[in-house]
Image: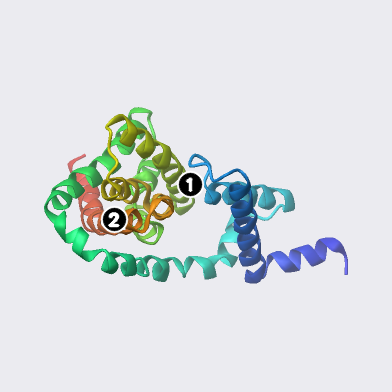
Amino acid sequence: MPANSLLTMLTTTPLFAVGLTLAAYLIGSGLFQRLKRPSWLPAILIAALLLAGALALIGLPYATYRQGATWLTVLLGPATVALGMPLYQQLPRIYQLWRPLTICLPIAATLAAFYALAIAWLLGSSDTILASIAAKSVTAPIAIGITEQLGGTTALLLGALLVTGVITIPCVSLAARFLHIDDERIIGFALGLNGHAIGTVRAFELSPLAGAFASLGMSLTGIFSALLLPLAWRLISIAS
């Protein structure tokens, strides 16, 4: 069988996309460990760059890859739900801060969407781009649903999610140092609220306590955004 025909046959099977994704992540994790785990270069970013390079090298269209990798995206929902376990384990400590967290969440989640939309709007971005980045601080399973409701592009959303998560980690670290904040609960909550899953992974690297509060921030931001962002978008569309 010719090499081109064999490659075409392999790339049309879901197992190829799944295997390619897992291989990129394993290699990315290995490089991340060898580089001594830099906060500015998480394993998922390395894996994404490797995967993008592999797709370009073999000439596989993104639409074809995404169709094959659907099996992995199905696991996003259960993985997010599984974060309820650390929340349950840290429930007493979470209850101690429920008042400030309740006040902080709506303000922070609103600002997370507003500043990105404001910057993009000032730069003259189209409605499709605005709809695609509106949920960039929300975890992927929820963000994809929100973006589809708003009429955005999922591919652009996923890119915005990656950039947001990567930038959040050093920004939260620098802000904590500047403000002399060493409370892992606050740092974890900020990482989860702004950096969704990528920030939550970083928080778990700090401690289980920070990871639990990051899970809380990510989950509450997702719920808040899913309920209010589509409504706010419709109201703005009607007003304009």
Residue closer to the observer: 184 or 125: 184
Sequence-first disc among 1 and 2: 1
- Considering the image in quadrants, where does the N terminus appear? bottom right
Residue found at x 85% / y 62%: 3
User: In x, y percent, where is residue 107?
Assistant: 18, 43
Against 21, is 130 above or below? above
User: Type of residue at label 1?
Assistant: Gly
Residue position for label 1: 159
Classify residue 98 by image quadrant: bottom left
User: In x, y percent, where is residue 113?
Assistant: 29, 43
Classify residue 112 by image quadrant: top left
| CA neighbours of label 1 inside 10 A, class few (<14), some (14 to 19), many (20+) | some
Residue found at x 59% / y 54%: 29
Number of on-image labels: 2
Classify residue 85 by image quadrant: bottom left
Q: Which colour scheme is used?
A: rainbow
Against 144, is 72 above or below? below
User: In x, y percent, where is residue 74?
Assistant: 47, 70
Q: In this view, does 165 lie to the left or right of 227?
A: right
User: In x, y percent, where is residue 193?
Assistant: 30, 49
> Which residue is most to the right?
1
> Which residue is most to the left?
99
Q: Is residue 141 left or right of residue 110?
A: right
Q: Is residue 107 left or right of residue 65?
A: left
Residue position for label 2: 213
Q: What is the secondary structure assignment of the residue under circle 1?
A: helix
